[in-house]
Amino acid sequence: MKQIRIPSYLHDVFGEKQTFGSILAILLFGGILTAALYWVFPEMTNNLPVWRSTVALLLIFDIFSGCIANFSASTSNFYAARKTNRIVFIAIHFHIVLVALLLHCGIWHSLAIWAYTIIGAFIVNALIGKRSQLFVAGLLLSAGLGSMPMLPGIPPYVLIIGLLFMLKVLFSFAVDHYGKAQHDSGEAA
């Protein structure tokens, strides 16, 4: 499939080259799931100013779209070749807490999900180039996904956002899915 050269200001999102189909899938997944979440749970934006609802929905779209984008070879390989960018990317992912603050709901749940996800992502990131990376990432993801629904009183839409946030950062992003970091560093898997 033909690759599209991505403008440099979008490299952090799509990598350097991406197929049209991948871009379309990423944007449709994020857009459709965000719209469905809002459709099913319109109460999440009740009594909020339009600007807060809009910013929250854009951040949710970013979480959902990024979850899929980070699985693409282009995005995964872009970050695998840039250790500093990887660390910065993990560190700045405070989206879920911002969404909770904007929606004024599930703040403590979001803080717990964020802390677990970021700590787990740094652990997984530290294992790049090691055979155990995928196993540890899967273990941490499974523990997080299995525990999250047991958080007392978690609103269902916060749970959905949290599940995909954790998948996005801890597994989709932190794992070197295509072995680019191993290849570039000369290490064997």
Image (cartoon, helix red, strand yellow):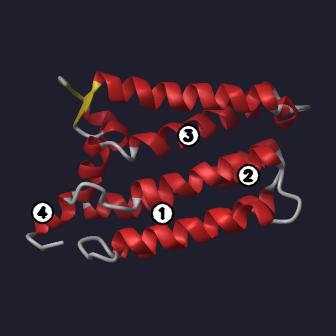
State the residue at coordinates (44%, 69%).
137
Confirm or deny contact between disc 2 and disc 1 (CB under 8 A).
Answer: no
Q: Mark 4 Cα within 10 Å, few/some/many (few <14, many 20+)?
A: some
Q: Marks 4/2: CA distance?
A: 37 Å
Residue 184 x %, y %:
11, 62
Give the amino acid type for the residue marked by disc 3 in the picture.
Phe
Give the amino acid type for the residue marked by disc 4 in the picture.
His
Q: Marks 4/1: CA distance?
A: 25 Å
Q: Secondary structure at mark 1?
A: helix
Q: Where residue 91 is drawn, which disc sits there?
A: 1
The residue pinned by badge 4 equals 183
Give the amino acid type for the residue marked by disc 2 in the picture.
Leu
Q: Marks 3/4: CA distance?
A: 29 Å
Q: Nearer the viewer, mark 3 or mark 1?
A: 3
Give the amino acid type for the residue marked by disc 1 in the picture.
Ala
Q: Earlier in the sequence, mark 3 or mark 2?
A: 3
Q: Nearer the viewer, mark 4 or mark 1?
A: 4
Q: Secondary structure at mark 4?
A: helix
State the residue at coordinates (83%, 47%).
104
The residue pinned by badge 2 equals 159
Q: Nearer the viewer, mark 2 or mark 1?
A: 2
Q: Marks 3/1: CA distance?
A: 18 Å
Q: Marks 2/1: CA distance?
A: 21 Å
Residue 164 x %, y %:
59, 49
State the residue at coordinates (70%, 27%).
36
The residue pinned by badge 3 equals 64
User: Residue 150, located in which quarter of the rendered image?
Assistant: bottom right
Q: Earlier in the sequence, mark 4 or mark 2?
A: 2
Q: Quarter holding the C terminus?
A: bottom left
Q: Earlier in the sequence, mark 4 or mark 1?
A: 1
Q: Marks 3/2: CA distance?
A: 13 Å
